Image: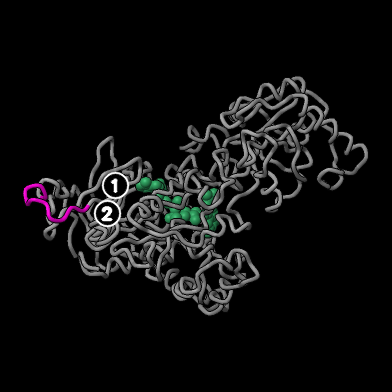
Amino acid sequence: MSSNAKGPNPVSRRGFLKTTVATGGAGVAIAAAGLHPKEAEAAEIKWDRSADVVVVGAGVSGLACACAARDAGASVIMIDENFDIGGRGMLSGGSIQLGGGHSLQKKYGTVDSADMIFADWTRHDHPSSRYSDRDIVRKFADENAATFEFLLAHGVQFTGREEGGGGASTNAGRTYQTVEWHIPSQVMAPHRGRNGSGLVRRLEESARKAGVEILLRHSMTSIIRESPRSGRVLGITARYMDKDINVQGKKGVFVGTGGHPGNVNLRRTFDPRLTEEYQQACAPYARQSGAAEVMSMAIGASLWATALQTSQSGAAITKTAHIGCQWGYGQLVIETDSPIFHLARATGLTVASWQDVIMVNQTGKRFWNELDGSYNFIAAAMAYNGDPDKLNGGGPIWAIFDSDAVAREKWNPKPPNVDPLYFASGATLKELAASINNPYQKRPMPGTVLQETVERYNSFVTSGVDTDFKKPKPMYKIEKPPFYAAWATPILHDSLTGLRVNTDQQVIDIFGQVIPGLYTGGESMGGLAQHGLGRDLVSGRIAGLHAGRSPSGTR
Ligand SMILES: Cc1cc2nc3c(=O)[nH]c(=O)nc-3n(C[C@H](O)[C@H](O)[C@H](O)COP(=O)(O)OP(=O)(O)OC[C@H]3O[C@@H](n4cnc5c(N)ncnc54)[C@H](O)[C@@H]3O)c2cc1C
């Protein structure tokens, strides 16, 4: 095993020049063969750090990759742009979907096999399996049980078996939840079911114990390849405190930056409707920067399974559960005692019944039955809303309600429960519309339109029939001031599309060839449109083992 070299380490390899230039977040490699030796020497890469395997992204797939690469005997440096490890895994529920007949399944008497997993995740009748690459699914199925045992070997603890398979899975005994990390100050939302903290902290603990070095607040700005479209990936450039450092990966570089919902430009490659107003579920803690995809594409990588970003199913884009805050995803509430509350700014108002509100778009019009949480609701929210200046994406969605609704829901519509930028109130509906002051509300909501919308809805309550959107038995009029508008725009979660890989998690270029030395996994990969931790852990571990076992500096 080689050790991590510290400090500047000029590297001269073969007779030609390798260097990188960062260009607006993405980087390109420059090759200039045939230079005068002195010129070539001047432009040699100065490696600030070096290891066998460099892992970019200390989230779920990155931690699995780092542990596996160490298991294979490789030295590892991890970098992450965040102030702490874990990525979105830190705020996840920690419900891990892995099966194939592992030891806990045997303990609970669950019958499962790799073939059963393969059969589930190649179903043509389910949107989360029909777009996946069958070779990748086969490898995923074959590596499920081994990945679960790998977690146990690295100290991950489980609470027991959960009911439910998720996605295309037909096996109810394939979901296991990790135990929450035991030090509350190291959990971003302690005691609120964010048990994923136990997964990432245990892997971190194991990785550090094994000698993995983790460089936080280091943001990857480019991938260094021998030449722009050929040759080996040699390392990466990362920005740390306004300084660029080059980190060499002698056996390989793994990029697992969590997918692309946080990158508006890239996510619109997959779905043009995903314009700037849609927020991502975990943004106050970890952004899904798309860095792995963008920087790999800059050196020739291909995307894969681009048919649909969301597969029109699952949690990839969802209705909000908490309104009046910027990020109101599902079970995730960032309470005032959370170490990251100052980033979230508000807890949001949790909606118990969607009968208590109506939803309007930025022009003040209803667009769908508020009780529906299916993809039809999302599609209607994202549809053209009649504003000629906003042809893509539906613009902000607002929940409109009155003081009677506040009483029924037992809400306290004040900070820190609501964020003034994502919440408004008014003595009249016109005043309410005028008081919406939000960066994504590009033009004022017309007060007369909002008033007409509410009056029409109130008439549906009288008649008992919603002739516009068929909301079953509209129950409550909106009539008692003050009136309120709370941010309720659908929120992004998974990336189900990403970089093209082979079954060893090596990144494939636009000509169908392996890019030697470059690996990816987790939500940065395409070809396996599956939600969550199971895919991330299996792919990270496969990549780590392959990179860690490969000879230094060879293809
Ligand atoms: C609220 C919530 C609940 C969830 N619950 C579950 C659950 O119960 N079960 C389940 O299966 N799945 C769950 N998930 C999904 C799961 O957490 C993700 O699938 C998983 O974290 C993705 O792993 P990843 O390695 O691809 O990315 P992440 O874990 O997000 O890690 C990516 C890392 O890359 C870093 N990064 C980004 N850009 C750069 C850059 N340029 N340079 C350096 N570092 C960078 C980020 O800071 C981050 O640490 C949940 C997700 C959320 C948001």
Which quadrant holds residue 336? Answer: top right
Q: Where is residue 380 in the image (x, y as percent from the top left)?
A: 70, 46
Whether the residue under disc 1 has CB within 8 Å of ligand 1: no
Residue 373 in view (yes/no): yes
Asked if the magenta segment contains residue 536, the reply would be no
**Label 2 secondary element:** strand
Q: Residue at x 73, y 38 (%)?
A: 359
Residue 337 image position (x, y, % from top left): 51, 36
Is there any visible trace of residue 93 in the rendered image? no
Q: Which of 189 and 522 is in front in this view?
A: 522
Q: Residue lying furthest front in this view?
A: 34
Residue 130 pos. (x, y %)? 59, 68
Question: Dot 2: few (<14), some (14–19), or many (≥20) neighbours within 10 Å?
Answer: many
Over which residues does the magenta segment extend? Answer: 31-40
Residue at image mark 2? 77
Q: How many marks?
A: 2
Residue 364 vs 61, above or below: the answer is above
Residue at 77 percent across and 31 percent down: it is 407
Residue 169 against residue 76 in the figure, above or below: below
Query: Who comes first in sequence, dot 1 or dot 2?
Result: 2
Query: Residue 470 or 354: which is nearer the viewer?
Result: 470
Magenta span includes 38 = yes
Answer above or below: position of 111 versus 39: below
* Foreground of the two, 94 or 330: 330
Q: In which quarter of the image is residue 546?
A: bottom left
Which disc is residue 215 wearing?
1
Mark 2 C-beta closer than 8 Å to ligand 1: no
Asked where in the image residue 553 lies, by quadrant, the reply is bottom left
Q: Which amino acid lies under the numbered mark 1 shown in the image of this protein? A: Leu
The amino acid type found where label 2 is placed reads Ile
Q: Tell me whether circle 1 and circle 2 mark residues in contact (CB < 8 Å).
A: yes
Tell me what residue is drawn at x 75 percent, y 19 percent: 427
